[in-house]
Amino acid sequence: AYHRTYGSIDPRWPGRVHLGLRVRSLASTSYTRTPIFATEWTGTDGVSPLVYYIAGVRVMLLQNGALSQVGSDFAANATGGMFDDNGSGVPYLYACFSGLAADALYIRRMARDQTFSTSADVVAHRLLSLNGRAYRTLTPTGGTVNCQVSVCPPGSDRFLAASWGTGQTVGLAGTEINALVGIRQSPASIKPEGIYAYSDGLDRWVNYAPFGDHHPDNGKGAYSMGDYIVVPMGSGGAVLFDGFTARAADPITINSSPGLHTTPNTIQALGQTQQWLV
């Protein structure tokens, strides 16, 4: 059993998801916003290992144990990010801020030399790079939430709105897409009502794992492990989705009781190091 004050992942069990103590801060810094995207990269010498992560209005750099900010603060809190190219093979770190065109908060990207640039017309609330394609979530014209997914094909510039296809509504038009992740080489959208995957045969998003509890925070912070994804639930705990079915990841034992031994804290962020999920 685990105590109800637990709220994160205990990394001491390779290949298993055990909830652990809640994460209060990341590294030694006064800027403690929860990271929403992280990636490994190398310095301009092509050798020095770096870790960049996006949190709040900042891009942070972790190098040789030292943490620092890259560039200046964004105009708004970032809502998503991806590591992708510009359509011609040049790598960039992308950040997005809003899927509503009227907000005019266009996506930004950072080159390896840490210079930033801003798109003139592309907005996005979530971003995903998968198999050469880029995916974004957005709010449709006249819509109220980010409920659509638009695709940018390989070889097309992510900074041009003309490169992106027409948005396709995923599930209920009144609920937000809380996560956009890859599983088994396919994109998945996680919403309060379930986990949706795109079907080429049906040309639509199908709810493969409906949730009984339509919590508005279901799926926030979801993480892909390749063949399955870990999906934090808004009411606490997490489920594992293998592309076909979802099952609870909570370590339930005979000493556990519903409610009493279920964490009230939602998972804030997930990551992977070798065979460990943290």
Image: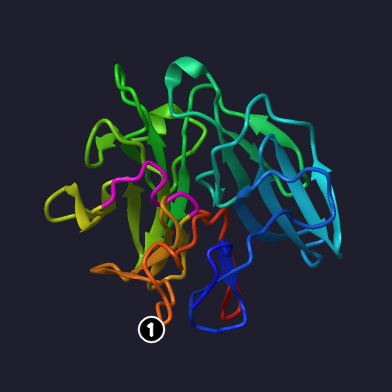
Above or below — where is 36 with respect to 148?
Answer: below
Residue that extends furthest to the left in the rendered view of this protein: 202
Q: Give how far across and how far down residue 276 sits, in percent.
A: 58, 78
Q: Report helix, strand or loop for mark 1.
A: loop
Q: Give how far across and how far down residue 207 sits, in percent.
A: 20, 53
- Magenta span: chief secondary structure: loop
Q: Give how far across and how far down residue 68 sits, in percent.
A: 84, 48
Above or below — where is 141 with respect to 267?
Answer: above
Q: Is residue 238 left or right of residue 210?
A: right
Q: Residue at x 37, y 65 (%)?
A: 239
Q: Is residue 78 left or right of residue 65?
A: left
Residue type (three-letter) at the residue carrying disc 1: Ile
Q: Assess whether residue 113 is covered by the magenta stretch.
A: no
The quarter of the picture where the C terminus appears is: bottom right
Tell me where residue 77 sits by quadrant.
top right
Q: Assess whether residue 219 is covered by the magenta stretch.
A: yes
Above or below — where is 16 with respect to 223?
Answer: below
Asked whether 263 or 138 is in front, the reply is: 263
Read off the magenta span: 213-221
Q: Give how far across and how far down residue 243 sits, in percent.
A: 28, 67
Q: Residue at x 86, y 64 (%)?
A: 65
Q: Is residue 47 visible?
A: yes
Q: Is residue 237 left or right of residue 139?
A: right
* Count of numbered circles on the image: 1
Above or below — where is 155 with respect to 165?
Answer: below
Q: Is residue 240 left or right of residue 278?
A: left
Q: Is residue 44 visible?
A: no
Q: Residue at x 71, y 53 (%)?
A: 52
Q: Residue at x 32, y 35 (%)?
A: 147
Dot 1 corresponds to which residue? 254
Asked whether 25 or 101 is in front, the reply is: 25
Query: Tell me, what colour scheme is on the image?
Result: rainbow
